[in-house]
């Protein structure tokens, strides 16, 4: 605990956000920054121009705390186009300050002491301390390396009559595993049997590589009244700084998320919301195709480059993260390795074990983000090559 943290609830004390802390080390040592998951590729110019015009000439006051009406319409339209599912924009669509706020809203707005929540690990780190803050009991079930598949019996062992929520993230950050329809059906059966609800974090929904299919909880009839899907503008449109996220799905879950955002951020910036609407409705379909193929190329550039050096690379099925097994490289665990890799190797990375409760798995795995400029990816491969030469 740092000396300013004594006023904080115990569950919030501890280290700073791991993603930004590791990227900070890259800046300190001039290392290739493959740590925090944000793209350094430019987002579409026409979206920024549209938002800039809206900033100058559009309305300047608070907007609907549920989200700008036309943006909610665009989100419902997107779901209808892709999945043929009708959402009620008044009760089943809400816009938040990034997906992270929707996830936090789901924890704070839906859990209390006496409830249980089951996280499918690896989880997205920032959600867990928020869940702890509610006083709910946290349970965990692991997707196990190297394939990161879900085991139904292990899931059922963690469920009880008190389970209110299951939380998963697919395509999965950090493992890169894309949950199959069968795995999602295991979750759906567990929800029905224990009268539980699902929070499905699908922010990498448009980053699924050939041979794999993203199955959204919105497509599963058994989950229709039992789930919300959380996603965002950040990754898909390459502008994480805009902070536009959303939650779509069952009204009682949306109500909890909405309550928390109304009580905290209240509403999003109006021009940013209109920019996000524009991106969803006005960009040509070719935008998403280019987004997918460009990231596939970058995945292969980094994974092949690291693989050619003899590193054990875990090639992801989705997301913009890959990982390496450091077991044969060092006696360090993942955290120790990442704490020194920016300085010693010249590459910043994120330790994977922090995405498991008690760091009980994956201490041999470190995560790299490949949504970076090609020159940064080459810099990382070259840095590993020289470091390995010296070993
Ligand atoms: N989603 C990003 C990642 O996984 C991090 C966002 C953040 O720093 N909160 O690296």
Image: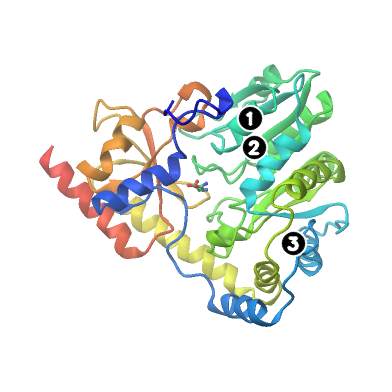
Residue wearing tag 2: 168
Residue indicated by mark 3: 82
Locate residue 366, reporting x and y percent. Answer: 38, 38
Alpha-carbon distance for marks 3 and 1? 27 Å
User: Pointers 3 and 1 in contact (CB under 8 A)?
Assistant: no
The answer to the question of whether label 1 and label 2 lie on touching residues, with beta carbons closer than 8 A, is yes
Helix, strand or loop at mark 1: strand
At 53% from the left and 50% from the top, the residue drawn is 318
Q: Looking at the picture, does residue 150 appear above or below residue 104?
A: above
Q: Looking at the rendering, which quadrant does residue 207 occupy?
A: bottom right
Toward the viewer: 55 or 149? 55
On whether ligand 1 comes within 8 Å of the CB at mark 1, the answer is no
Q: Tell me the distance, in whole angstroms, between the alpha carbons under discs 2 and 3.
A: 21 Å
Mark nearest the camera among 3 and 1 is 1
Residue position for label 1: 119
Residue at figure coordinates x 57%, y 68% from the top left: 289
- Nearest to the observer: residue 108 or residue 327: 108
Q: Which SS class for mark 2?
A: strand
Instruction: Identify the element where label 3 is drawn.
Output: helix
> Is ligand 1 within 8 Å of the beta carbon of the residue shown at mark 3?
no
Q: Which mark is residue 210?
A: none
Quarter of the image that includes the N terminus: top left
Q: Earlier in the sequence, mark 1 or mark 2?
A: 1
């Amino acid at each position: 605990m740092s000396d300013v943290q004594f006023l904080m609830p115990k569950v919030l004390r501890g280290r700073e956000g791991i993603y930004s802390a590791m990227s900070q080390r890259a800046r300190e040592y001039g290392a290739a920054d493959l740590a925090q998951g944000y793209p350094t590729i430019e987002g579409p110019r026409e979206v920024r121009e549209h938002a800039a015009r809206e900033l100058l000439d559009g309305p300047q006051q608070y907007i609907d705390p549920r989200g700008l009406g036309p943006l909610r319409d665009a989100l419902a339209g997107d779901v209808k186009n892709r999945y043929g599912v009708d959402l009620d924009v008044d009760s089943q669509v809400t816009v938040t300050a990034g997906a992270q706020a929707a996830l936090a809203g789901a924890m704070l707005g839906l859990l209390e002491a006496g409830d249980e929540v089951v996280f499918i690990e690896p989880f997205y780190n920032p959600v867990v301390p928020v869940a702890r803050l509610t006083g709910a009991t946290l349970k965990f079930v692991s997707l196990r390396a190297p394939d990161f598949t879900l085991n139904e019996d292990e899931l059922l062992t963690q469920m009880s009559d008190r389970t209110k929520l299951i939380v998963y993230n697919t395509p999965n950050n950090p493992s890169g595993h894309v949950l199959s329809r069968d795995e999602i059906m295991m979750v759906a059966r567990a929800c029905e049997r224990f009268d539980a609800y699902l929070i499905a974090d699908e922010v990498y929904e448009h980053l699924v590589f050939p041979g794999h299919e993203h199955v959204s909880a919105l497509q599963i009839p058994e989950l229709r009244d039992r789930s919300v899907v959380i996603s965002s503008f950040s990754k898909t449109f390459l502008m994480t700084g805009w902070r536009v996220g959303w939650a779509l799905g069952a009204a009682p879950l949306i109500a909890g998320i909405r309550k928390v955002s109304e009580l905290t951020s209240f509403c999003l910036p109006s021009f940013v919301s209109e920019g996000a609407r524009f991106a969803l409705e006005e960009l040509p379909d070719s935008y998403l195709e280019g987004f997918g193929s460009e990231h596939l190329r970058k995945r292969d550039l980094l994974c092949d480059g690291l693989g050619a050096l003899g590193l054990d690379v875990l090639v992801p099925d989705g997301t913009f993260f890959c990982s390496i097994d450091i077991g044969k490289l060092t006696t360090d665990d993942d955290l120790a390795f990442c704490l020194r890799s920016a300085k010693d190797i010249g590459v910043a990375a994120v330790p994977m074990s922090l995405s498991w409760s008690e760091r009980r798995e994956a201490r041999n795995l470190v995560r790299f983000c490949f949504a970076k400029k090609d020159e940064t990816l080459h810099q990382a491969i070259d840095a590993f090559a020289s470091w390995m030469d010296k070993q």
